[in-house]
Image: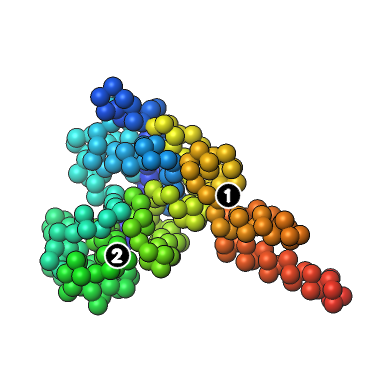
Amino acid sequence: MAGITDKSEHAVKLKHVYYGQGCTNVLKDVSLAIPHGQWVCIAGRNGAGKSTLIRLLNGLLLMSRGRILIDGLELNGRTLGDIRRHIGMVFANPDDQFVGLTVEDDIAFGLENLCLSREEMQQRIRTCAERLDIVHLLQRHPATLSGGQKQRAAIAAVLAMEPSIIVMDEAASMLDEKAKNELLGLMRAMHAEGRYTLISITHDVEEMAEADRMIVLDGGMVAADGSPKELLLQDDLLRRCRLKAPFALQLCRELKARGIDIGELVREKEVLEALWSYHSKRFLTATGTGG
């Protein structure tokens, strides 16, 4: 897979970006910078400008004014083709992305535009299929797959193009709980590799909690930008975004009400670790074996 480019310290940079429809500005003076390898969740109410923002990144929409740089390349008519090779997009409905009669054909479709040899195309298809655990689905028609299988096939088609930036636009919104958890696990694994910059638009606070950074849009403007732990603890911000607190945080608060104070955590893994530590200390104290 493609490694992180060294053209710029930032994978994505927006400078005073506006986007308007008619007399209305959907995005207003948005400036932000996303370093290479960072996982960023973009949150906000419906209509806040989230999907508009990510569609500006690869020229699906054209900004009214401002500057957008992708891997150090300024987005314009001359660089659009190059920039689109840097960005892979995964949408909520994978059916919108399928063009082939089989999963293999669908993955191959994008590769054909790269003028690769047949051998290299087959190697990329096989590598991505193995990684996404869909080798057994390569000869299936996309319409016969489950929701989770379709999304994995769509992601395989994106990864085969070897982008450095992966954008997930509500990628889990049409999946059942099992498939959502599988997708979140895949995103964790991709992030751990360090070769991709992940940008995900989501209403799922559990997904937000896993990211390095959370950006909240409100009324087309950046209303908050910080770590998920910092922002997900702000009840007023969650109310404005119409989000519930993560299950982990709700559990921490319930435990505190029952006399078990492990702090306020937003990731379930951290809660398990904190509970283990809490009860281990109590056991050692009770048995007189602690330090």
> Going by the image, does 282 lie left or right of 66?
right
Binning the other alpha carbons within 10 Å of mark 2 as few (below 14), some (14 to 19) or many (20 upward) gives many
**CA distance separating discs 1 and 2:** 30 Å
Using the rendered image of the protein, determine whether residue 126 is visible from the camera's viewpoint.
Answer: no
Residue 269 appears in which quarter of the rendering? Answer: bottom right
Residue drawn at 58 percent across, 58 percent down = 248
Q: For the C terminus, give its image quadrant.
A: bottom right
146 left or right, relative to 81: right
The kind of residue on which mark 1 rests is: Lys
Check disc 1: other Cα within 10 Å, few if <14, some if 14-19, many if 20+: many
Q: Please tell me which residue is depicted at 25% across the width and 58% down the height of the picture.
A: 94
Q: Is residue 260 visible?
A: yes
Residue 147 disc label: 2
* Residue that carries the numbered disc 1 in the rendered image: 229
Give coordinates of residue 219: x percent, y percent: 41, 31
Residue at the (29%, 27%) spot, across then down: 20
Q: Earlier in the sequence, mark 1 or mark 2?
A: 2
Residue 171 image offset from top left, x and y in percent? 34, 55
Q: Residue furthest top?
A: 23
Q: Are marks 1 and 2 in contact (CB under 8 Å)?
A: no
Q: Against 16, is 172 above or below?
A: below
Q: Amino acid at mark 2?
A: Gly
Coloring basis for residues:
rainbow
> Closer to the camera, 189 or 246?
246
For discs 1 and 2, the disc positioned in front in the rendered view: 2
Residue 147, how many percent across, how many down? 29, 65
Q: Quadrant of residue 284?
A: bottom right
Q: Secondary structure at mark 2?
A: helix
Find residue 15 and report its horizontal and vertical position in percent. Answer: 38, 30
